[in-house]
Amino acid sequence: MQCAAAASLSSSRATAWAASATSRHAGVASCSTSRHAIAPLRVRGQVPVVPLSLSLLSARRPARTRTALAAAAATTAELPPAASGGIAGAVQLGAMIVAWYLLNIYFNIYNKQVLQALPFPLPYTITAFQLGFGSLVILFMWAARLHPLPNLSAAQLAKIAPLAAGHMLGTVFTNMSLGAVAVSFTHTIKASEPFFTVLLSAFFLGEWPSLLVLGSLVPIVGGVALASLTEVSFNWVGFWSAMASNLLNQTRNVLSKRLLGGEEEESMDDINLFSLITVLSFLLSCPLMLLAEGVKFSPAYFQSTGLNLQELCVRAALAGLCFHGYQKISYMILARVSPVTHSVANCVKRVVVIVSSVLFFRTPVSPVNALGTGAALGGVYLYSRLKKSKPKSQ
């Protein structure tokens, strides 16, 4: 009888807890709906952008999450056992790739919204804001002793400074391209990263590709050219900005690999290396921002133009958070795989971002444009297979 009474009491408590939890969730949902009913940003230009709020992102989150999970699983399956470090290492690497993809999706959505909402292009200011936001997170990490401070020597600083300059300029050119053309087209151009990786790895690391690997670059270059010819939003500023971003980012990745895997007295862990690059990039971006754009806006100015200042700041802050997060995870992945493997995983990420941006922004895509994008991405897959099966040339 005591057991029956205990079971009855436990059942009644469970029922009461479930009812209270249901009411709490209903209350939170109603509050969330009213809280996110914010006036959309007024967009510069003739093409409107889909009004974005946190509730809208939450409604579309499952599809993007499933896409990122599937892409990350395919990417992790392509890694050799030595790169992934066994089952546990493969699971950890797969989780990092999923987070990398999701943060990049959200960054591109928020960043594109901010860039289009501004009354005039401000790529240097946006870059300085994103790098400054990341620098604050890094300083908090060091102050709270969440990660040990780096032992930085003068020789290391001399090596990191050019990487920081390249990182800062690469981010500027990416923001220029995203502000000038569609997100999907920017990432189609940036899918040509293996071309720059092969060139820079041969020059800096002495990794010479085979003829088959070089041949796999042909559909990548051809696909990007075909997509460029049929892109509705095409302009030369967006095209060359994305190409310059490719060159600078891949130079940073290849040279960072040398620092991560150098001699013991000169090597540095991936988090501290990325953190130092981010802080130095922010310091370099501030004078460039003032020289190139100056202080062209204020809260009063934004309010006079009719922009929703609160929503603009929220989106810019979220874009900065996602930017810092996916960049840090990218460096953590780079420390575990080769530059070529990292570039291939990055190109798979392009597929996820392209599909997500086309669906979210409702970007018109012609059959020929889709064929060019598919050819470029197919060339990336062929490139990855050949790099996996062929030994490095000595």
Image (cartoon, helix red, strand yellow):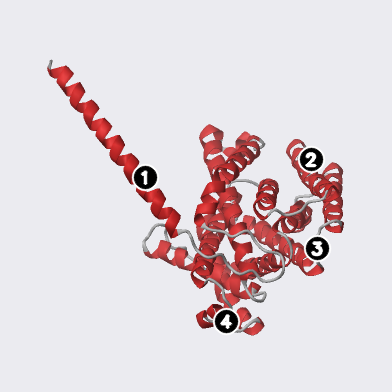
In this orientation, does residue 264 appear? no
- How packed mark 2 is, by other alpha carbons closer than 10 Å (few <14, some 14-19, many 20 or more), is some
How many marks on residues? 4
Give the number of the mark in front: 1 or 2: 1
| Position above or below: 323 against 9 | below
What residue is pinned by disc 1? 25
For the residue labelled by badge 4, is the local secondary structure a helix, a strand or a loop?
loop
Instruction: State whether residue 390 is above or below residue 206.
Output: above
- Residue at the disc numbered 4: 297
Mark 3 or mark 1, earlier in chain: 1
Please name the amino acid that badge 4 sits on: Phe
Is residue 59 visible in the rendered structure shown here?
Answer: yes
Quadrant location of the N terminus in the rendered image: top left
Q: Nearer the viewer, residue 193 or 54?
A: 54
User: Tag 1: residue type?
Assistant: His
Dividing the image into 4 quarters, which one contains the C terminus?
top right
Pointer 4: residues within 10 angstroms few (<14), some, or many (20+)? few
Task: Specify whether 112 is left or right of 196.
Answer: left
Q: Does the residue at mark 1 contact the one at mark 4 (Cβ under 8 Å)?
A: no
The amino acid marked with disc number 3 is Phe
Tell me the residue that label 3 is attached to: 234
Could you tell me the amino acid type at mark 2?
Answer: Leu
Q: Which of marks 2 and 3 is nearer the N terminus?
A: 3
Q: Residues within 10 Å of mark 1 (few under 14, many from 20)?
A: few
- The CA distance from mark 1 to mark 2 is 48 Å
Q: Real-space Cα distance between discs 3 and 1?
A: 46 Å
In space, the residues marked 1 and 4 are separated at their CA atoms by 41 Å
Q: Name the residue under label 2.
A: 382
- Callout 2: SS: helix
Compute the Cα span from label 2 to label 3: 27 Å
